[in-house]
Amino acid sequence: MPMPLRMTGLNVWLFLKIELVIIAPANSPLIRAAGDLENATLLVFRYGCSYRDRLTAWLQQAQVKPYRLVKMSSYHAILGGVSAGMGVGIVPRPILNTFPSENLITVHPFMEAGSPVTTELVWRKEGLTANIRALIDILSSEAKSVSETHRRAES
């Protein structure tokens, strides 16, 4: 059984918390449960994407089978495919700020354990180098930017 990180001589910094949302074509019915995606076409990244894995595990746990999985190469491809009526996808909420035609999609909460998704930086307690400090500084400013963009989008 893995030990908690605080007991392993490591520092952990949670620098980003992202809410995942399910997006569907405009005028789609509300998606409240995995069963609402029975026989849906899922627009997702390739195998190994953690967001795809979360979505497909949620569906499998509810014994829901999608019609098919269509592999997309970018968030913009997923947004475009969903807006064209190809299927549904899962994206981090801040990505919606990059999509100019929000009226072409509907946004639904992703009610899965482990959402929102957290991203952490981990390093050895005695290993705080100038490079790690610089990375922390960059990530701090980026995380603030994402949070501010998210807050503006909600208001």
Image: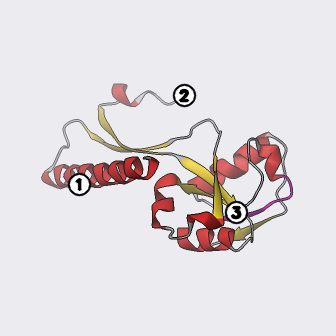
Which one is in front in this view, the residue at disc 3 or the one at disc 2? 3
Q: Residue at x 65, y 39 (%)?
A: 111
Q: Marks 3 and 2, how far apart in space? A: 45 Å
Q: Amino acid at mark 2?
A: Met
Assess whether residue 123 is covered by the magenta stretch. no
Label 1 CA crowd tier, 10 Å (few <14, some 14–19, many 20+)? few
The residue stretch that appears in magenta: 38-46
Q: Is residue 89 left or right of residue 118?
A: right
| Of residues 134 and 128, the one drawn nearer to the viewer in this rendering | 134
Q: Marks 2 and 1, how far apart in space? A: 30 Å
Label 2 CA crowd tier, 10 Å (few <14, some 14–19, many 20+)? few
Query: Which of disc 2 and disc 3 is earlier in sequence?
Result: 2
Could you say which disc has been placed on residue 71 in the image? Answer: none
Residue 144 visible within the image = yes
Query: Which of disc 3 and disc 1 is earlier in sequence?
Result: 3
Assess whether residue 41 is covered by the magenta stretch. yes
Residue corresponding to mark 3: 26
Could you say which disc has been placed on residue 1 in the image? Answer: 2
Q: Amino acid at mark 3?
A: Ala
Image spot of residue 103 (x, y percent): 61, 64
Residue 46 visible within the image = no
